[in-house]
Image: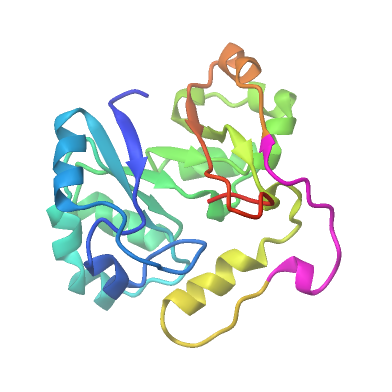
Amino acid sequence: MAMCDYMKSTACSDLLKEAHCTEGRAFVGRELSEQDVTQLNSAGIGIRLPMSNHFVEREEYENNRPLLQKYHRPCNSVIVTNDDLARWIQQDFPKYHIDASVIKNIKTHKKIDEALKLYDSVVLPMSLNEDLEFLEKIEAKDRITLFANAGCALTCPSKLCYRSLSKINKGKGGKFECVLMFKERELLGMVDFPLQPYVDLGFHRFKLLRTRPNGLTGY
């Protein structure tokens, strides 16, 4: 990677739970201790704070400035879905690398170009890994993150879970939704992509999912 490697944490601080800013899954608990973060940053390894909830209010942002200030270091990054949140962080905490989350579902060249005006990098939907012609035409390949493997989202037509969990994580009700509740679709389990074709095209940023116990998807 251009500046440093990254380790993703869904809970680098207890404040994350208060912020309701976790991503496409429910908040479970803290994953990295403060000592972990210090040692990682000292070794040139940044942490990635997932703040990819669809729904963000300015008041929440203001209340959680201490979290962003605490980890505001050049090697660290935030993963964002909401454009307003990305702008606020960019303005107030410019040392962060801001990733456009895969949850934004950016899958056209026009949308990639637009997103890169705001975000430092864009995580593309894993289904685009299967379209080498599309990938080849992307100009800013050094600012694109591809998936090294894929789970259930690879064949999901609408990804209802992303938005439904955003509502749940806000603590304002809502219920979990999945396409499988409404129609059957093919589940391939965890799929590994051969990385060399993407490297040959000029891509060097990859995201690796951890397999869930059922083997059907990752996180």
Determine whether 12 is above or below 172 in the image: above
Work out whether residue 5 or residue 115 is closer to the camera in this orientation and state it: 5
Q: Which residues are magenta?
A: 178-191
Q: Is 190 in the magenta?
A: yes
Work out whether residue 167 or residue 30 is closer to the camera in this orientation and state it: 30
Determine whether 124 is above or below 28 in the image: above
Q: Residue at the spot x=13%, y=54% of the render?
A: 70
Determine whether 135 is above or below 17 in the image: above
From the top left corner, tell me how far across and down residue 8 is, in percent.
36, 45
Residue 28 lies left or right of residue 145; in this view the side is left
Q: Residue at the spot x=40%, y=44% of the render?
A: 99
From the top left corner, tell me how far across and down residue 140 is, in percent.
49, 26
Location of the N terminus (image quadrant): top left
- Residue 15 figure quarter: bottom left
Determine whether 170 is above or below 102 in the image: below
Taking the view exactly as shown, the residue that stands out farthest to the bottom is 173
From the top left corner, tell me how far across and down residue 166 is, in percent.
49, 71
From the top left corner, tell me how far across and down residue 17 is, in percent.
31, 71
Q: Is 207 in the magenta?
A: no
Q: Residue at the spot x=86%, y=64% of the render?
A: 184
Q: Main secondary structure of the magenta part?
A: loop
Residue 119 lies left or right of residue 195; in this view the side is left
Residue 134 lies left or right of residue 97; in this view the side is right
Q: Residue at the spot x=53%, y=21% of the render?
A: 203
Decide if residue 163 is in sight here.
Answer: yes
